[in-house]
Amino acid sequence: MGTAPLPDVYLNAIGTATPGHDIHRAFVGWASARIPDPRERRLFDRMAARAGIDHRFSVLPIGPDGASPVAPGGFYADPVLPGTAARMAVYADAAPALALRAIAALGPAVSADPGAITHIVVASCTGFTAPGIDQIIARALGLAPTVERLLIGFMGCYAAVTALRSARHIVRSVPGARVLVVTVELSSLHLQDTPALEPLLAMLQFGDGAAAALVSGEARGLRIDAPFAATLPDSADLIRWDIGDQGFAMHLSGEVPGRIARALAAADLRALLLGEGPDGKGADRDGPDVIEAVPPVDGWAVHAGGRSILDAVEAALGLPDDALDASRAVLRSHGNMSSATLMFVLARMIGQPIANGVALAFGPGLAAEGFRFRAA
């Protein structure tokens, strides 16, 4: 007697939210002025102009006369920047508030019947508070006290994949499960006082944002197919967060795009990414009896980690010029919002006639995580 096939799982809807305070140009001016070497300063200015980012938003309040957080009266105005405790105090209030805005953007998918939510999965790596923001969100929404919660921390830019993959496992194992997935990141809380070019270029990428999704067995939105994960060898120090006395210091090596390009050129990772075996066919790894031909990828949801990373993915995979348009649009309008970014890209895919999509993100490790998807 054969094993019954596992049910299909769908990402039904996505809601997104960003704060209203655009801090991108203020940061560029602040960072450029801190670089003492004129040649490095000119290099920073050129790279900022070519970053493909027009806007990044922050939860930090607008200062007097509409000033930015680095202007007099702003959060970062003093010569000694705020300590980690002050930054986490902002996170404890602002992260749940922004997450609730993203959930509200889902519309009636959650608000019409919050009691139908059986599980909540929250991903965030830019702050800590206890009780966790999963409990704060559940209480604010009026979810049942029996709702099961999962908090995913410090996994960085691919945490949305981890969250959606976890939701998929839940729906496949719990009949009737309806999972609320939330990603919320407040990267602007971690400005570092440094004149060094590489960390300033890393900070140039990041902004604040939140996204929420409903995952269930209802055939609506995007079907989440087989996930994949691969940690790249000899790359552990290329992306790193270090917790210090003045926030979390982001380390994003300039070697990351090249390392990604080399990894994507390898046959084993390409096979994992595209779901292809040596015979050109693929199988859902959760159901070995289901074998089918793999159609060409017609939808790419790649984490918008930066222009150079998107360029590396496009070149390494030989993608058409417009294949990463959704990712580039998110980068241009919001910057890199860590775990929330991929959700913003996927939100642009819902409603498109995608037969074989690939979601892909890179983060600390250096690791590549993703899943295949298709329109319901």
Image: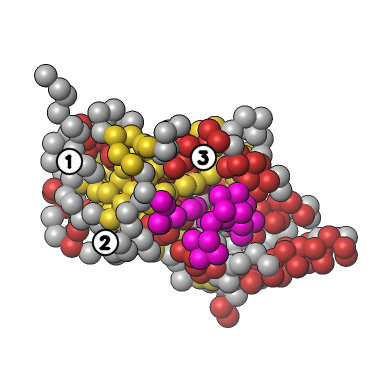
**For residue 85: magenta?**
no
Residue 98 as seen in the image, left or right of residue 196 = left
Which quarter of the picture shows residue 67?
A: bottom right
Give the farthest residue toward the top. Answer: 1
Q: Which residues are magenta?
A: 296-323
- Residue 106, disc: 2
**Sequence-earlier tag: 1 or 3:** 1
Tell me, yes or no, whether the two marked residues, 2 and 1, touch with CB atoms within 8 Å. no
Q: Residue at x 13, y 36 (%)?
A: 175
Q: Where does residue 251 sit, x and y in percent of width and height?
A: 66, 44
Using the numbered discs, state the Cα–Cα distance from disc 2 to disc 1 in whole angstroms. Answer: 18 Å
Question: Which residue is tagged 3?
Answer: 270
Where 123 falls versus 95 (above or below)? above
- Residue 60, disc: none
Pick whichever, 67 or 303, lies toward us.
303
> What element does badge 2 sit on?
loop
Mark 1 or 3, closer to the camera: 3
Residue 286 as seen in the image, left or right of residue 368 = left
Any part of residue 296 in sight: yes
Question: Which residue is tagged 1?
Answer: 177
Using the numbered discs, state the Cα–Cα distance from disc 1 to disc 3 in whole angstroms. Answer: 33 Å
Using the numbered discs, state the Cα–Cα distance from disc 3 to disc 2 in whole angstroms. Answer: 34 Å
Q: Residue at x 38, y 63 (%)?
A: 348
